[in-house]
Image (cartoon, rainbow, N blue to C red):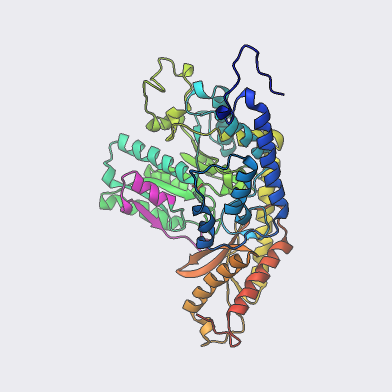
Amino acid sequence: MTTTPASRPPVPPDLRHLFHPEHADHYVAAMRSGVHHLADALGRVSDPATGLSPEQAAEPVVDVDLDEPLGDPAQALAEMSRVWLDDTVWFHEPAYAAHLNCPVVIPALLAEVFVSGVNASLDTFDQSVGGTFVERHLVDWTAGRIGFGPGADGIFTSGGTQSNLQALLLARDHAVAGGTPVEQLRVVTSGDGHFSVQKAARLLGLGDDAVVTVPVDADRCLDLDALAATLQALPGYGLVPMAVVATAGTTDFGAIDPLGGIADLCERHGAWLHVDAAYGGGLLVSPTRRHRLAGIERADSVTVDFHKTWFQPVSSSALVVADGRTLRHATWHADYLNPKPADPAAAPNQVDKSLQTTRRFDALKLWLTLRIMGPDLVGSYVDRVVDLAAEVGSRVAEHPDLELAAPPQLSTIVFRFRPHDASPGDPACDDDALDALQARIRSDLYERGTGMVAATKVEGRAFLKLTLLNPMATPADLVRLLDAVVASGRTLTTGTGAVER
Ligand SMILES: Cc1ncc(COP(=O)(O)O)c(C=O)c1O
């Protein structure tokens, strides 16, 4: 397959590792062996984890002498399996139901080959050429799905945290450009908003007090009356609500804040509306549930994480803004990279809109996904996991030993084990003991490798959480996981129902 022009000198052996046409055979062989290695590993998996402790996971890794290369790819892959792959966590396994990790679609994995092989960088046109326009077309398409007008724009980012950071940077600079001193700026979000909002406020120099949280209502959605009262009250303290962050799919409960009502209040108080749809953004392509995001089109900016409910490999996220001109707050020109052009159309540099400089062509993954599968099919996967969560939620609600914290809204189920036969006064009814029990159940399932569930707190008490993002999981799979939770809870309690501490 490889042809070496007669006029060129032979390639020195130490350069054979470089991606180069003369190494095409080597490239194809290495990739083929890697893909087979992964497929073989996948074929052997039957549980989401093997349950290593941090000490056990660290031990084989730190023993590797990085100054002594193995040279041979087969040996290196075998070692990689030993130090990591054999004991990794598998998100395609139905009993994986912990965090917002999704199994990934094959079209996106196909794109990964090109993303890293070609290694285009999306900062400037002269490093990406058509890639710039692939990303722009996807941003425009996403903006269209949101319902933004023609002035919309955006940028791919590394994840929801970065998208939220950039949104708040734009909001801050928008407010400062309007004449408000930074120390007076406040960001309002619900108590169930994502912690990246607080982190962003700190990074943006707004201070830890800058985020004002308002309570959630009985459905775990931001309480509109409380928001109205807060927005009304802030000016009385000499403070300016620069932004409201509404969450479309809270991390724990999947709750979608009342976007239309929040947009009304933002309009009235001149606050930037950012919608963190990192989780719920998949509803943009749902054939049946798009209406649940009604009002999102009135936002100033929206975070969408393709690496959550769009089944894309990490990383893949976007910040989309209603008015593309606001992205100027992220613009900086450098003579060596993106000098200020006389004609911006002649220099379509995505770095002008991004917090990053060198940036992966993550957009290609979504591109091939849409071109191979189409949006309806991706959205139907979202619908499947939302349906599954509703079904599993009812099973939890019916179970005598499980307590459901709230009805599922997207694809999470927050619950705890509480033995029904523990009588009042029994230590197993004691809140502290129940808290300790949830943590032990979680560790027990992980250590035995039978299931992975997440932990959270509701009103200060420990709960377990299932996050369902696997469209291939069935109700029977999840009932088995619930049974494992109950069996573990029962085993960890004594015959009297008292919790062993
Ligand atoms: C609602 C919400 N926003 C933002 C994020 C942060 O996203 P990322 O982990 O991609 O930075 C998450 C992560 O789970 C989230 O649930």
Q: Is residue 414 above or below residue 38?
A: below
Specify whether 336 is left or right of 320. Answer: left
39 or 355: nearer the eye? 39
Query: Is any part of residue 8 visible from this angle?
Result: yes
Residue 245 higher or lower than 177, as above or below: below
Camera-side residue of 175 and 108: 108
Using the image as rendered, state which of residue 109 and residue 343 is in the foreground: 109
Q: Position of residue 43 (x, y in %)?
A: 73, 52
The residue sitting at 47% across, 41% down in the picture is 163
Q: Position of residue 397 (x, y in %)?
A: 64, 70
Residue 201 drawn in magenta: yes
x%, y% of residue 83? Answer: 57, 53
Q: Who's the residue at 63% across and 64% down the image?
A: 449
Q: Residue furthest top?
A: 7
| Percent x, y of residue 362 | 56, 36
Q: Nearer the viewer, residue 45 or 404?
A: 45
Instruction: Judge whether residue 283 can be spotted in this image.
Output: no
Residue drawn where x is 66% and y is 27% of the image: 24
Task: Count every numbered label the image shows and give the total.
Answer: 0
- Image quarter of the N terminus: top right
Is the residue 18 above or below the residue 255 in the image?
above
Residue occupying image coordinates x 47% and y 77%: 432
246 part of magenta stretch: no
User: In the image, is 142 to the left or to the right of 212?
Assistant: right
The magenta span reads 196-220
